[in-house]
Image (cartoon, helix red, strand yellow):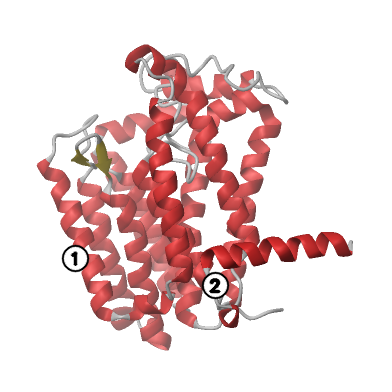
Amino acid sequence: MGNKENELDIKSTRISRLFKLNKAHGEIDYILFYTVILLVAVGAIMIYSASSYRAANELQDSMYYLKRQLVFVFVGAAAIVFFIKWDYHKFKNPRLVIVLMGITILLLLLVFLFPPINGAQRWIQLGPLSLQPSEMAKYVVVIYLARSLDKKGDGIKNFWSGVFPTLMVAGIFAGLVLAEKNLSITSVIMFVAFILITVSGAKKKHLFTLGGIGLAAGMTLILVAPYRLKRLLSFMDPWADPRGDGYQLIQSLLALGSGGFLGLGFGMSRQKAYYLPEPHNDFIFSVIAEETGFLGGIIIIFLFGILIWRGVVISIKCKDNFGTLLAMGITSVIAIQAIINLAVVTGTMPVTGVPLPFISYGGSSLLFNMTAVGILLNVSRNRVKW
């Protein structure tokens, strides 16, 4: 037992040296660190498996998508290292927050200068690469909310001077994302805003009011957009239109069912062969479950459970309120996205375009999620010990 403890100490010391951590500020949460590294590694492996068939046929390079994803894996790793050492309290600087918000708004507006992809304008094309500003917007809103709510303190109990202005700023970002026809990320932003307002101590009657308004707004947005209504109806009965709006969900369910307990084996998925429309992106979990079975799917869910647990623990243990709110916001963004993605592929909620964090193909998503984890790990260094 003593030898194992010594080995863990040696590994922790090596990582501390790699990141040049100052022991006076505490160590990072290694459970969270290793969990994220494992999720990213699984994501890279499964992106190759899920995309290789199409990439070989269409691009004559079975590793095309893997190579592109690995670029962002290395950039994201560098971001983690940087933000682990970069004091998160610097985000309390109003000038920095304003600059981040201004850049994000500018990027959210720039997407409208580029042609739509699949009917949505969400990307800025940069040669062979693309940037999705909404991925950045989620975390910039979290930084703003953490600073604003920390500054307000008990003032959050007043609706008009506390809750309303805070929610309006989050609503501006959500509105810009919604204009890009991205209801899913819009929902994530507003859900996170609601969670942070709740954690800050807002009154229950205000929270119930906000919940009712949010539900009514969500239903309205679904009803006024025909394609959203079709998705809702197809979710309720996908077999009513098996070759149309119900197609994606049916193929996903077939993949989940085909995997059995142990799966068909790595690379052996049948649904990725032009059945699932997005096998390496939004529906990558279906391919994982098909190839690794129920057991593999449960392991992925378990890893996300660990990540969320450690994020909440970091938030609760943090020595200052700003760090608590920042950690809770970052954890909430990742948790909500993971829950929505898993709910979509299992037929628990209507199909919507939310990638599975750290696993789905997408450079913008991976880069900003890994950056956020770096900040979260930095917050973990400023926690009390129980």
Q: How many angstroms separate mark 2 from mark 1 (CA)? A: 32 Å
> How far across and down, in percent of the image, does residue 214 sit?
36, 57
| Residue corresponding to mark 2 | 21
> How far across and down, in percent of the image, does residue 8 sit?
74, 61
Residue located 23% across and 41% down the image: 123
Kind of residue at disc 1: Gly
Residue located 23% across and 78% down the image: 95
> How far across and down, in percent of the image, does residue 90 sit?
36, 78
> Which element is circle 2 on?
loop
Whether residue 218 is situated above or below residue 61 in the rendered picture: below
Q: Residue 122's mark?
A: none
Would you say 95 lies left or right of 152 here? Answer: left
Residue located 49% across and 45% down the image: 358
Q: Residue furthest left?
A: 113
> How far across and down, in percent of the image, does residue 293 sit?
67, 27
Would you say 2 lies left or right of 203 here? Answer: right
Whether residue 381 is situated above or below residue 348 in the rendered picture: below
| Residue corresponding to mark 1 | 102
